[in-house]
Image: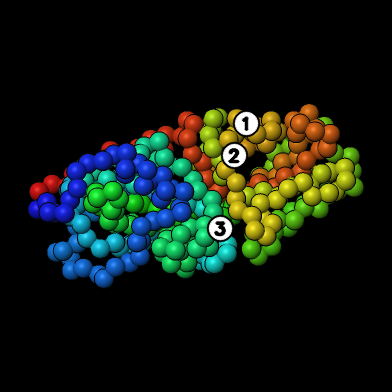
Amino acid sequence: MKRSTTRAVRAPRVLAAWLAVVLALVLLGACTPGKKAQDDQTPQVSVTGTFGSIPVVTFRPPLPLTESSVETLIEGDGRELAEGEPVVLTLTAYDGEDGELVDNRQVGEVRTLMLTKEDVGEDLYPVLVGAREGSRLLVRQPVHEKGMDRMLVLVLDVRYTRARGEPVTPPEGLPTVEVAEDGTPSISLPDTDPPGELVVQPLVRGDGAQVRPGQDVTVQYTGVAWESGEPYDSTWAAGKVPRTLKLDETIPGLRDGLLDQTVGSQVLLVIPPAQARGTDTLVLVVDILAVSGGQDASVVPAPTTSAPD
């Protein structure tokens, strides 16, 4: 593969700065599908790995400068993303100059945003609208900043925004949960005194990674106070998006209740005041959407190798 005459010298700090912007999803250059090139003109980029895992990306660097393009590697089966709704994303970026990760500190980091042009940027917006949760997208993106030109290769996972898995029938005597068509849970409390100990009851059992100590956990949740029935908080409310919690820094009952649960699960938690840092017993319904960091081996960057001649 010939080197492009417009290829710029390496500038990792510029790339890292640009990636930080990408990961903040304020701007993604001109990331819209360009005119489709012929097969022999399109640089070959191979991506392996399952959805939600760190991708292994293989290509022969340096990649020549080309138009930006978007390719669906895995077609998701979740909801179709629409304007004004929450979106949960994971981005991994590689430098087309040498095939290295642009910034391995960001690998596996989960971003939660509202799907608007203001939140995700005008260029990423049309890429995401209409995409389905569970999809993996490959983006080839030319970058120009401070006189430097190169290609970036981005792998973008569109994560699910609600629990997915096998339903679990809870025992009698616990708060009951009904789930609306859009995934929003509502909680009905029994006319009894709250339990004195932490209750952890899966309602949906997902088949994703287990939650480990020290991780960041991305969740949807809604909650009420047992004694008063008053709403506690909810990420399902209009204008809100899922939250990413540092597990070791959240309230003890939530931390202990999520440990060892799996991504895709929905869990009912009844948290006594001593583990909730307050005077009320909290009832939470938590959808576990993603984990990152900590002891999760899946966020260790996979090696990137050059394609053979």
How many other residues sit within 10 Å of disc 2, few (<14), some (14-19) or many (≥20)?
Answer: some
Residue 11 figure quarter = top left
Quick check: 192 above or below 278? Answer: below
Q: Which residue is tagged 2?
A: 245
Residue farthest to the front? 146
Residue 114, disc: 3
Mark 1, secondary structure of its residue? helix
> Of marks 3 and 1, which one's residue comes earlier in the chain?
3
Q: Which residue is tagged 1?
A: 249
**Could you tell me how far apart the alpha carbons at marks 2 and 1 are, in whole angstroms?**
8 Å
Left/right placement of residue 307 relative to residue 223 reads left
Residue drawn at the location 79% of the way across and 50% of the way down? 231
Residue drawn at the location 78% of the way across and 28% of the way down? 274
**Could you tell me how far apart the alpha carbons at marks 3 and 1 are, in whole angstroms?**
25 Å
Quick check: 179 above or below 258? Answer: below
Residue drawn at the location 45% of the way across and 53% of the way down? 25
Mark 2, secondary structure of its residue? strand
Question: Is residue 47 visible to the viewer in this orientation of the structure?
Answer: no
Residue 260 image offset from top left, x and y in percent: 58, 35
Amino acid identity at mark 1 = Glu
Amino acid identity at mark 2 = Leu
Mark 3, secondary structure of its residue? strand
Residue closer to the observer: 239 or 16: 16
Label 2 with label 1: CB-CB less than 8 Å: yes
**Could you tell me how far apart the alpha carbons at marks 3 and 2 are, in whole angstroms?**
18 Å
Residue closer to the observer: 264 or 243: 243
Residue 290 image offset from top left, x and y in percent: 52, 45
Left/right placement of residue 254 relative to residue 90 reads right
Left/right placement of residue 137 relative to residue 38 reads right
Residue 137 image offset from top left, x and y in percent: 37, 58
